[in-house]
Image: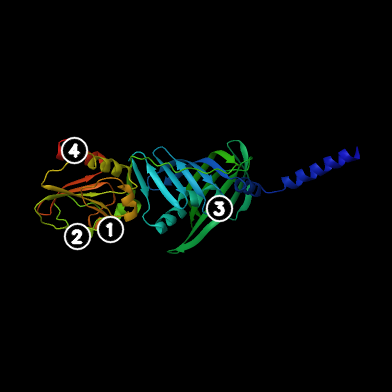
Amino acid sequence: MKKILSIVFLLFSIYRLYAQVPDIERAKRKYFQANVISYKTTAYYPNPDTDATSVFSVLYTVYKPQNKDFEFYSKNETSEEFYKNNSYYEVNHHEKTIYEYENKDNQNAAISSSRLRQFGPTTLLKMKWSYIDDTQIDGKIQSHYSNIESINHYEGKEIKVEYHIYISGNFTISKFERKSFVDGKLGQTVTYLFSNYIFYDKTTNFKVLLPKNYALKYYERQDSVKPLAKNTEVPRFKAADINGKPVIFNSKKEKQTLLLFSSTNCGYSKIISDYILSPGFKLNSQTELINIFGSDSKANVKKYFVNTEVKFPVISERKDIEKQFGINGYPMLYLIDENGIITETLDGSSQILPFLKSLTGK
């Protein structure tokens, strides 16, 4: 009997000790002992000028959440994100385009400032929090914690930003608020709701599954680089093709020229490549084709055309030419007349393929 009572007392003591552990600490254990966490985020951003509220809903899966540079996958109504092995891709299904960063520093800066990395549950739990009270949300008691994110002074006014989180009875963050105050008066409140949590103990890796028939674009070029318009006189250039043969493009020549800009990682480029390498594709004697893979290495381009007879010049490793011609995505095609003037500017396989077919009649 004494042995049973001792066991009961021990269990009761353990329960009391566990009950005294703050909810925030229990939440940290739950999140950071998991190997994979999936959840839904719904964010509300009010616009003080219009009284409208922008709403964003995203499904996230975070891998190794205890790591600072954790990998992740996300999905919403129109797009998906993949971040794995320090490579980031956004797949926009509405545009049928894959976006990536040309520069790793730009990529890492963008990920660090993303909503997930700034306001995701695993990031929030690594901050220092002060317990405020227990509050009722949707009829359930939740632990309320706060954190002063910043206090600044501007034009004689104090601007303070506070973070608030609410931890539910199952030790998950259910709500996050970012409140801004000007001289103590509440301004904007941004709210994040977290739901549909699933915690996995088993180590799981995910595959980056990118569509094969989508275009490729670089974020950095979207605002800074614009394709050349029709009736523009084009610059001349000199280059060497992937076999070392010189390629000279003059602004004025006897033939009209098709300048095709492609990428080995672009699905739409592959569609165009398959067509111009097919037996049915044949340009007339007054038209020449130059294919430029300016952002690809020579080795990758040679692999791209391995065991293939290529009857036109292929140029690689020339980002400077892409910059000259305003290439911000692939594929891009210019038709240039004998006087060096652009007569057609075409973007994407849906424009380029029918145009090429019209030139050959097939």
Residue contact between numbered discs 2 and 1, judged by CB atoms under 8 Å:
yes
Disc 3 designates what residue?
67
Question: How far apart are labels 4 and 1 at the CA level?
Answer: 28 Å
Q: Earlier in the sequence, mark 4 or mark 1?
A: 1
Q: Amino acid at mark 3?
A: Asn
Q: Nearer the viewer, residue 57 or 208?
A: 208
Name which residue lies at 22% across and 55% down: 325
Instruction: State which quadrant residue 234 falls in.
Output: bottom left
Query: Element under label 3?
Result: loop
Q: Earlier in the sequence, mark 1 or mark 3?
A: 3
Percent of width and height locating residue 235: 17, 58
Q: Nearer the viewer, mark 3 or mark 4?
A: 4
Asked whether residue 260 is in view, the answer is: yes
Residue contact between numbered discs 3 and 2, judged by CB atoms under 8 Å:
no
Q: Earlier in the sequence, mark 2 or mark 1?
A: 2
Disc 4 designates what residue?
357
Question: How far apart are labels 3 and 4 at the CA level?
Answer: 51 Å
Disc 1 designates what residue?
318
